Amino acid sequence: MKFGGTSVADAEAISRMINIVESKLDKNPIIVVSAMAKVTDLLYQIADAAEQKDEATARALVSDLRNRHTTVINGLIPDGPEREKALEEVYRICHNLEVFVEAVCTLGELTPRSKATIISNGERLSSVVICYAMRQRGINVGFSDARKMIIVTGDKLKGEPDMEAIQELVPKKIALRTDAGYPVVITQGFIATTPEGDAAVLGRGGSDYTASLIGMAMNAETIEIWTDVDGVKTADPRRVANTHSIERIAFEEAAEMAHFGAKVLHPLTIAPAVEKNIPVKVLNSMNPTSPGTIILQSDQIEEGAKSISFKEKILMLNIFSPKMIDVSGFLQRVFQIFAKHNVSVDLISTSEANISITMDAGQDLTQVVEELSEFAEVRVFDDKSQVSIIGKNVANQRGLLRWALASLNNVTVYMISQGASSVNISFVVDRENLDEVLQEMHNILFEY
Ligand code: ADP
Ligand code: ASP
Ligand code: MG
């Protein structure tokens, strides 16, 4: 059972999440918690301030962090030993953070390892608060540190799980607690360690991924992602009016939705569940009786459009070269450059002398553009958005494209990608038209 930031945002939310856990004690759940809402953002600000040697700001922000958690403890746990222990632990973690941040301020240099150390504190704090609150409520919960189970390699701010180590360590560490008589175990999402013992994290929104990694390693019956909406919806309810909850979707559909921008799940959450065929449920901690969404193997799911995803900020490159005409190996030359600079691309479309490519914004393309410019004309557009219709076999659904295009009547479409994946049709439009396109497309496909 994973509880996201809004599900543990304050005393009231935590109290609600404890009720939910209490109703499932017979299942011996493992609880994975995120940092309280906005706390990870605050920690990123602390890291930035430290890097800029702005000690006053960094200290003030650490103080905000401490106050936020002590306020929740005081509102949630009545006076007594659990409250004392929770406060003591929060003071200790915040004190250590302050000392660490001062050191970074002095050095004025923030390595990925230091940044990972700083941003790990949100989950460490929330897990402590929730653990003591659960104990005070009479739940015999054991505490297990995710950093001893989730081993990652590569980028310390977006680690790649070492599946073998995780499958070995998770059952061992959890058994240490269950064998000691704890029916429930709590741990943190997002945070991890490298094989060398350095701090690392799984990337923004990574707590979902932690939950599915643990679910996989434990051969869990179900992986429950508790969030702030009634399951996976036909579009992001924050951007589109009249969305509906989807009762059942396939692993492939959920993975594709997340990969193409739906923030409801971290894009890599589904893979570990698929590995062991474990159903993933997306549920609303603010409305626990709502059925939410169940994500299952594809053969149990009907075909058709399920949802609209979008990426608001993308980069689109248009590469023009007359040398491409009738020449083999041109695409290879182009993509070698992307590979060399570790830039991953999303959509591709080619014509006689042009290639259009989209990729996530925030990637540094300077060198890619420089090298491409040696043999082609390159234009970079940073004012585009990508909209995707996701659903099993949607690419082969007769008539769907006609409806989709009808919703794009009044806007310029720069790229269409259909057919490469049977679960996805994507369009590139101007960012200024995004809201209009999303709503119109949703009205046409899902207003019933
Ligand atoms: P948590 O903190 O629980 O991890 P997130 O904010 O990461 O929650 O994800 C939940 C949010 O995802 C919702 O509030 C919603 O705005 C957004 N979202 C985007 N696309 C969808 C979708 N298709 N269905 C449901 N929610 C979506
Ligand atoms: N706290 C982390 C974040 O905000 C991870 C998560 O909530 O999933 O990105
Ligand atoms: Mg999330």
Image (cartoon, grey):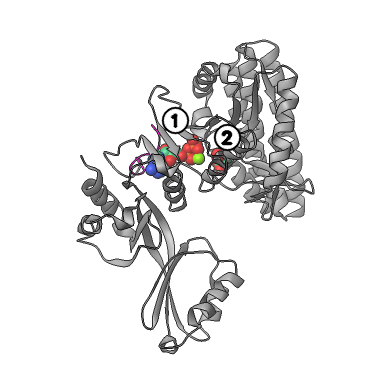
Which stretch is magenta?
A: 228-237
Q: Quadrant of ligand 1?
A: top left
Relative image position of residue 410 (x, y in whole percent): 20, 61
Along the viewing direction, whichever of 104 and 80 lies nearer the viewer: 80
* Residue 200 seen in the figure: no
> Which x, y percent locates residue 439?
26, 48
Dot 1 or dot 2: first in sequence order is 2
Q: Nearer the viewer, mark 1 or mark 2?
A: 1
**Drawn side of residue 39 relative to residue 118, left or right:** left
Residue 316, given in percent of the width and then of the height, sits at: 42, 68
Q: Identity of the amino acid at label 2? A: Ser
Question: Was residue 236 drawn as part of the magenta stretch in this picture?
Answer: yes
Q: Is residue 258 above or below residue 74?
A: below
Would the CB of label 2 be found within 8 Å of ligand 2?
Answer: yes
**Residue 328 visible in this rendered orientation of the protein:** yes
Check disc 1 and report the residue beneath it: 283
> Label 1 sits on what residue type?
Leu
Residue 333, position as x, y percentages in the image:
54, 80
